Amino acid sequence: MQLRIPGPTPCHPRVLEAMARQMIDHRGKEFADMLGRLTPKLKQIFQTKGDVFIITSSGTGGMEAAIVNTLSPGDKVLATTCGFFGDRFAEIAETYGAQVTRLTFDMGKPVDPEAVRRAFQAAPDTKAILVTHNESSTGVTNDVKTIASIAKEFGAMVLVDSVSGLSSIDLPIDEWNLDVVATASQKGWMTPPGLAMISVSQTAWQAHAKAKMPRNYFDFTKARNFFEKGQTPWTPAVPVFFALEVACDLILAEGLRNVFARHARCAQTAREGVKAMGLTLLTDPKCASNTVTAVNAPPNLDVARMQKILREEFQVYLAGGQGKLTGKIFRIGHLGWVTENDMKEVLAALAKVIPRAMIQA
């Protein structure tokens, strides 16, 4: 089977094997020891010396944690959005009462750093910027480094959704001065869904001390206090913790730079393969994601039928478009446990199925 959606992604056999272990006491020494081993490994992959916490939730929970722990109702927030998940980040901030200004870009286009600069010049008292590192709904990777440097010129915090980026695409958190970064286990981490991992800078901690948005389950103070005891505040998804530790070992054994290079090769294989079929990409190659490729569907291609044939006859699973892009694009995921040969198998199946999924005039 080729599960090539942007997540959940295939799990390495050693990761699956780890989940078969018997449960342990999540308030006991064995869990504390595991958490003590796992957290430094996460810090290496996050490329940070700051705090990293593991929350039993989806990636969206990590995004919510980033907002409620650092902001207060009424705070001015600049939300950059170029797709479905940028909109989600903005909606979370709005739900908790932030004064959100949306800086919106066309689907398939990246966030323009100069537009970010103009937005800060218009509202220099903006408290934070929300950035989607890798917009998996459109296959765009944003220039987080430049965006963050601009935000810091105006003293704003940088809150980043890297759910589908971190561990697969380079994101040096400390070097780029990112304040809160959230990711999730089911993407490039080769682990089942269930965990959000989130980094917290010293600037974010200072903001946290003054933040007044309501929080309980996602409270960083609770997370830190329990971490000092080798625990999580709430009952953790213990089997996914087992799995994540093994996945981190695999990533670190391969080497971060090698992992990033492998994802770049897989992405290039996917992009070149679809273009060889006469198809076009939604995104410019300069901003194209190395974890998901968004392909424009020809006007006479029935995307749902194509997905159905791929699934039922070839055991290949691709994602369609979301929101306004439903039926207009399809997406090939290439993140986590993936090789160039996997991409070649997907492309071979795709070449056979597309002619069969065309709507006859």
Image (cartoon, rainbow, N blue to C red):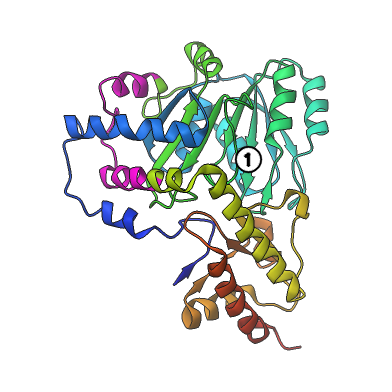
- Work out which quarter of the rendered image holds the C terminus and state it: bottom right
Quarter residue 263 falls in: bottom right
Within 10 Å of disc 1 (Cα), the crowding (few <14, some 14-19, many 20+) is: many
Residue 172 x/y as whole percent: 59, 32
Magenta part of the protein: which range? 221-247
Say whether residue 228 is magenta: yes
User: In percent of the image, x 60 and y 25: which residue is there?
Assistant: 98
Quarter residue 180 falls in: top right
* Nearer to me, 81 or 146: 146
Please, what is the three-letter code of the amino acid marked with disc 1?
A: His
Residue 2 x/y as whole percent: 48, 70
* Nearer to me, 131 or 250: 250
Q: Is residue 41 above or below residue 125?
A: below
The secondary structure that dominates the magenta segment is helix
Residue labelled with disc 1: 133
Q: Is residue 228 left or right of residue 336?
A: left
User: In percent of the image, x 56 and y 60: which residue is there?
Assistant: 333
